[in-house]
């Protein structure tokens, strides 16, 4: 059988170590599907139900493994559906390769059916974006696309027309007029060692030596450098605040951390940001600057791998362009341990109080079920190396505060795009990557409903993921955001009839159960988590439990009260829930 160009394309992916492609077939990529069939012993194709899910899976695969994630979609609508998941990869700096089809070259520009210029559509989302117009370009463009995705930590896109896909491999249909041969490169990428200049490291050491009350803010860019971060915290006597994407940098029981920051952060972190003279930012581009010190009031040392991001959020006195681990290894020998521990000890005491208050909210005797109790039960059920894939919404608050990082646990969510729906596809991709680990999708009912068909994908591939739905039958985060603007809620509760997600899970061939009483939650989770295959537990939680900020400002309290005065329809049940929370904390 004659070798076709698509066969060369897929074989080159395998040369790069790609073992999985997520996608949906279509008439715009039938040639590429044949290439996958001929390379099935090297690259598996994971058939999904929606291209958006395929892009989320490629993104999660890249985030969790550090290797290129690959998704595949047909021309026109298939490529359009990838876009949201690809923006998730772009904004969270995950290396992803999107491969799409295109109408055959002879009809391009004629308005042929499903003709959408996907290279133009992807112009903003991609770091490399090419239409393949000659079989001679492959496999070289595969090499260049993957190198760009790794080097620039983003999305690369190859769009391959139908006729190119099935053309004989290496076909050279045109006369050469340029003084160049067809491209020939290798499937090799070496990441450069990134260490700041010695003079910059020395300046940073001077700033830290002069500080008296410092704090460290870590993001996911500090992943893998947790031990070095703790050494820095111990040396300069500084508490460590974690962004939500950076939750897994340090264990939540570390004596140095004050937990999260922002609306879903902790009160100690909020107070700390107003009680420092120096801020060390490690691998973070935290966007919510109202939760950071006011510009010009503190000295800032920032370690950032991408030089254009250094100093974006606050004026930076010493920007250190480099990898967090390599930078700290250079910086720590220049620092002397601070003997005054009062600043650190102050916030350690505050964290003990905060943790006690959070435990008080994890009450298993309340009905409707407190969402904090559900998150606490998940924390108890999860293995020491479990992976939690969290969706966007109120669940992010409950996960941030009540699901702990310890041992080898990992935590993933859509950090900067903050899109709904990635929790389930994330878990499927990560379970493919790590078949021996426990992988949990923690979602709201709104996010789960968007891509719920992918539970069937998990069942088809017999992936033992555990899906837990925090079901408040509403778009809960939007509800509270409306109220904190002073407006009564509107258009955010789904009402009746309630969808039966558990029945859907059983219909797919998995375990499915619904829980409405606190006393039933523990036993049902045990049954689901010990089930050998995919399992789903739909938990009806209190829809009137607000995800309160760690530290409520006067303006927030005033607006919240105004929403009651302006006709908030559930004010009695919300007030009752808040009263119960406060009683339990007291």
Image: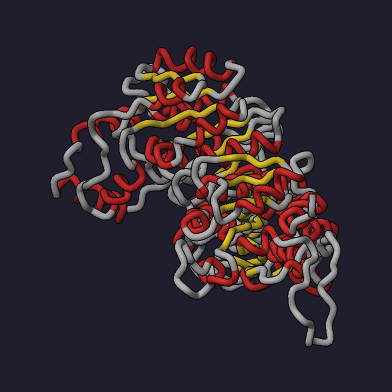
**Residue, x 48% and y 52% (percent of image)?**
418
Q: Residue drawn 83% across and 63% down?
A: 193
**Nearest the eye: 506 or 197:** 506
441 in relation to 123, above or below: above
The part of the image, by quadrant, that contains residue 493 is: top left
In the displayed structure, would residue 278 be above or below residue 430?
Answer: below
Q: Position of residue 553 (x, y in %)?
A: 35, 52
- How many labels, in total? 0
Q: In the figure, is residue 542 to the left or right of 184?
A: left
Residue 57 is situated, as x and y percent measured from the top left of the image, at 59, 45
Height in image: 461 above or below 284?
Answer: above
Residue drawn at (39%, 20%) of the image = 514
The answer to whether residue 234 shows anywhere in this view is no
Q: Is residue 433 left or right of residue 122?
A: right
**Residue 580 appears in view:** yes
Picture coordinates of residue 352, whole percent (x, y): 55, 34
Q: Nearer the viewer, residue 348 or 95?
A: 95
Residue shown at 39% from the left, 27% from the top = 501
Q: Nearer the viewer, residue 5 or 303?
A: 5
Q: Which of the 4 quarters of the picture holds residue 153? A: bottom right
């Amino acid at each position: 059988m004659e070798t076709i160009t698509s066969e060369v394309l897929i074989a080159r992916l395998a040369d790069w170590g790609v073992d999985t492609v997520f996608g949906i077939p279509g008439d715009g990529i039938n040639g590429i599907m044949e290439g996958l069939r001929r390379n099935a012993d090297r690259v598996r194709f994971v058939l999904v139900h929606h291209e958006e899910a395929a892009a989320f899976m490629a993104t999660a695969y890249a985030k969790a493994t550090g290797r290129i994630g690959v998704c595949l979609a047909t021309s026109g609508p298939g490529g359009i559906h990838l876009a949201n998941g690809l923006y998730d990869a772009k904004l969270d700096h995950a290396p992803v390769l999107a491969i799409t089809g295109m109408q055959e070259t002879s009809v391009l520009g004629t308005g042929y059916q499903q003709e959408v210029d996907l290279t133009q559509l992807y112009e903003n989302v991609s770091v490399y974006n090419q239409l393949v117009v000659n079989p001679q370009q492959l496999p070289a463009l595969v090499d260049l696309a993957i190198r760009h995705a790794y080097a620039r930590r983003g999305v690369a896109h190859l769009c391959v027309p139908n006729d190119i896909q099935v053309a004989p491999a290496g076909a050279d249909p045109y006369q050469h007029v340029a003084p160049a041969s067809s491209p020939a490169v290798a499937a090799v990428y070496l990441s450069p060692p990134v260490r700041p200049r010695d003079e910059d490291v020395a300046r940073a050491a001077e700033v830290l030596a002069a500080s008296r009350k410092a704090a460290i803010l870590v993001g996911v860019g500090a992943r893998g450098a947790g031990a070095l971060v703790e050494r820095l915290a111990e040396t300069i006597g500084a508490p460590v605040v974690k962004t939500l994407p950076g939750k897994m940098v340090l264990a939540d029981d570390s004596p140095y951390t004050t937990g999260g920051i922002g609306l879903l952060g902790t009160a100690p972190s909020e107070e700390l940001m107003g009680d420092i003279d120096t801020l060390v930012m490690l691998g973070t581009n935290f966007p919510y600057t109202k939760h950071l010190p006011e510009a010009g009031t503190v000295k800032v040392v920032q370690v950032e791998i991408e030089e254009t991001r250094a100093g974006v959020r606050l004026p930076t006195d010493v920007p250190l362009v480099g990898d967090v681990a390599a930078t700290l290894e250079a910086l720590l020998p220049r620092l002397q341990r601070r003997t005054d521990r009062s600043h650190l000890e102050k916030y350690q005491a505050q964290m003990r109080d905060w943790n006690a208050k959070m435990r008080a909210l994890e009450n298993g005797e309340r009905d409707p079920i407190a969402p904090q109790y559900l998150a606490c039960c998940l924390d108890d059920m999860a293995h020491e190396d479990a992976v939690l894939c969290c969706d966007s919404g109120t669940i992010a608050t409950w996960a941030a505060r009540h699901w702990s990082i310890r041992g080898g646990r990992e935590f993933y969510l859509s950090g900067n795009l903050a899109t709904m729906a990635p929790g389930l596809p994330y878990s499927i991709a990560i379970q493919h990557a790590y078949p021996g680990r426990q992988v949990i999708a923690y979602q709201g009912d709104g996010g789960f409903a968007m891509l719920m068909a992918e539970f069937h994908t998990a069942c088809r591939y017999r992936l033992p993921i555990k899906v837990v739905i925090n079901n408040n039958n509403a778009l809960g985060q939007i509800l509270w955001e409306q109220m904190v603007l002073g407006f009564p809620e509107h258009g955010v509760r789904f009402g009746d009839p309630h969808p039966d997600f558990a029945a859907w899970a059983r219909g797919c061939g998995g375990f499915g159960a619904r829980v409405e009483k606190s006393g039933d939650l523990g036993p049902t989770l045990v049954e689901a988590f010990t089930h050998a295959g995919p399992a789903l537990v739909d938990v009806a939680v209190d829809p009137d439990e607000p995800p309160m900020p760690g530290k409520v400002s006067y303006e927030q309290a005033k607006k919240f009260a105004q929403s009651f005065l302006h006709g908030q329809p559930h004010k009695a049940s919300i007030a009752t829930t808040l009263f119960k929370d406060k009683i339990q904390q007291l």
